[in-house]
Structure formats: structure tokens, C-alpha cells
Amino acid sequence: MYIGELSTQSGLSIDTLRYYEKIGLIPDPTRDQGGRRVYQESIKDWIAFLKKLRATGMGVKDMARYAALREMGPETANQRRKMLEDRRDIVSAKIDELSDCLNLLNYKIDLYEEMERDGLKTSSPLEAKVQTKGLLKKEN
Amino acid sequence: MYIGELSTQSGLSIDTLRYYEKIGLIPDPTRDQGGRRVYQESIKDWIAFLKKLRATGMGVKDMARYAALREMGPETANQRRKMLEDRRDIVSAKIDELSDCLNLLNYKIDLYEEMERDGLKTSSPLEAKVQTKGLLKKEN
DNA sequence: CCTTGACCTAGAGCGCACTCCAGCATTTAC
DNA sequence: GTAAATGCTGGAGTGCGCTCTAGGTCAAGG
């Protein structure tokens, strides 16, 4: 499988695939006689996992660290587990934060709907209302 | 309230406060005789809301658009509502995505624990196991 | 007075994660 | 045999969201 096909199938651009290789996220593939990268099917699973890690907000440096540990073999399992646990905690916290944001958005959308239904009769700033409800300032 | 105090109370750096002002996220404050910014208490609520929008992943350009609509008064309420609805959908989708990621992380952490408990007896790549479970590739 | 500290401006610089470019080689289809 | 498609490299460029710097002003305390 050449890079174009891998790009199509993995959803990463050709440039990104080469970039990921350069920074050590993807192992150097074999080359054909013409010097072109030849990928094995199994790389797709690894890339799918990398995409999941990126989706969690992990930076490419951390991902490269994880990839390097993986290359080193099973004796690094505990370090990789630790990284995933750290990431789990971060993701968990982010979900909570986004849930808060979602509540606030829904609350303000309701206020706007009310305001539009009432024909713009109230012109007091919505942010003030939100504050009085104590929906903001929960943290920060 | 001068910028230093606002920085402390809002959790944004002084530089960020001036930057937000420059790009139109924060209304231009009045100045004292010496030209120094003087803020009203109410700005803190607005900044708290801006921080929430940022936490949802909204870019500063969109935030500036929202801020500009707000400056224009109540007749822009429907446009602002639309923006918040769009953002709600994005946040909702992001929560779902992160929940998926959380499941995958937990699954892999379990595998690592198992592997470490079994004394590294299996050296097959974990990514392959994950793939066979169909936890990856749900989208992408 | 004079120093200290908080503030000011315009603009440069930074870290991140790509993305694009120029210039070239190879392969494939006609 | 030639043109189009696909690939290669090294390095520059991009957009984002700040963050920092240089060189200055201003107000309060000793």
C-alpha cells in the first residue's frame, strides 16, 4: 500500500503521514525499488489509535513518547499504562467541563428564545442574568 | 479597577486582556488621567462567559463576532442564539467523541493491567487486540 | 527629589500542528 | 515515447492564541 492509498483509508493527509513519520509517530515504512513508501495493512490500526489520542487533546510530543515506548517492547507497558491513565483523567475532566458549558449554552439559548418571543421587550444584558443564576464562576 | 486587579480576578493575563480588547472581545474601557485602563465590575461576568466559550473550543474570531453582535444590541439576538445553538451541537458531539475515547482508554488500561499482572507473558501488540474488539474505526 | 512599581504602546516572537512549495524521480497509460 | 499521475526531499509558510520585549509614562512612598 502506497502513501496515497493509506491517506485515503486513514483520513490523514499525505503530508501529515510523512510528518508523523518524521516526528516518530509512525514507524519508518519499507520502500520499493523507486524509493516509495510501502505500508502494511496493520499500520491502519495504529493510525486509528493515534487519531483517538489526538482527539483526546494529547499533543504530538506525548504521542511520540508513547510511540517510542511501544517500539521498546513489553517492558515499557507500565509507563504506557500510566500515560493512558493520565490521559483518562484529563479526558474525564474535559467531559465534565464541556457538560457545564453545555448547560450554560442551553440556559442562554432559552433566554434568547424567551427574549425573541417577548418581542425584545427586555434589553438587560443576558450575561448579567446568567451571573445571577450562579451558572458562571463555578470555577475559574 | 485597573488591569492588574482584573487579571488576578479574572484569571486572564494582563497581556491576554489587552489582546482581547484589541481583537474586540472586550469593550474598550475608560481611562484615568494617566491613560490607564479602568474597568467596571461588570466586565468580570462577561469575561467569565468568554472563558466558557473558549472552553468549548470556540475560536477567538467567532467570539469576536459574538461580541460584536452583542454590542449592536437586542436586534441581533437571533444571530447570537444561532451561534450558541451551533456551538451547543459542536460541544455535544465533542462530548460524545470524548466519551468514546474514554471507553477506549479504559479498555486499553485494563489490557495493560492484565498484561502486567500476567508477567508480560503475551507480547502481541495491544493495538491489534483493540482493533479486533471493534472499538476503533467506529468513525474516521 | 528619586526610586519603585504598575501601567502604556507597537510590534516581534513563540509553540503547535500541520500544510505547502520547488524541484526532481519514477511509474503507468495511451 | 511522451504525458499524466504519483511519489520523493528539504525547507518554508500558515493560522492560532497568546506571550514577550523595548522603551516609555505616571503615581505613590521614603
Image: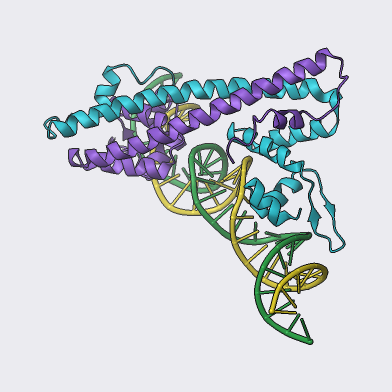
Chain colours: A cyan, B purple, C yellow, D green
Looking at the image, the residue that sits furthest to the top is: B117
In this figure, what is the number of numbered marks? 0
Residue A20 in percent (x, y) is at 71, 46
Specify the quadrant that holds the N terminus of chain B: top left
Instruction: Determine the residue positioned at 33% across, 39% down.
Output: B83
Q: Nearer the viewer, residue A135 or B40?
A: A135
Residue A120 in percent (x, y) is at 14, 34
- Compared to C19, does A92 lie above or below? above
Residue B138: which quarter of the image? top right
Residue A3: which quarter of the image? bottom right
Residue A87 in percent (x, y) is at 64, 24
Residue B28 seen by the camera: no
Residue B115 in percent (x, y) is at 81, 18
- Compared to A50, does A131 lie above or below? above
Q: Nearer the viewer, residue A49 or B32?
A: A49
Specify the quadrant that holds the C terminus of chain B: top right
Residue B54: which quarter of the image? top left
Instruction: Determine the residue positioned at 22% across, 43% down.
Output: B72
Residue B77 seen by the camera: yes
Q: Nearer the viewer, residue A125 or A121?
A: A121
- Compared to B121, does B13 lie above or below? below
Q: Is A16 on the left-hand or right-hand side of B120?
A: left
Instruction: Determine the residue positioned at 46% across, 37% down.
Output: B15
Q: Is A8 on the left-hand or right-hand side of B68?
A: right
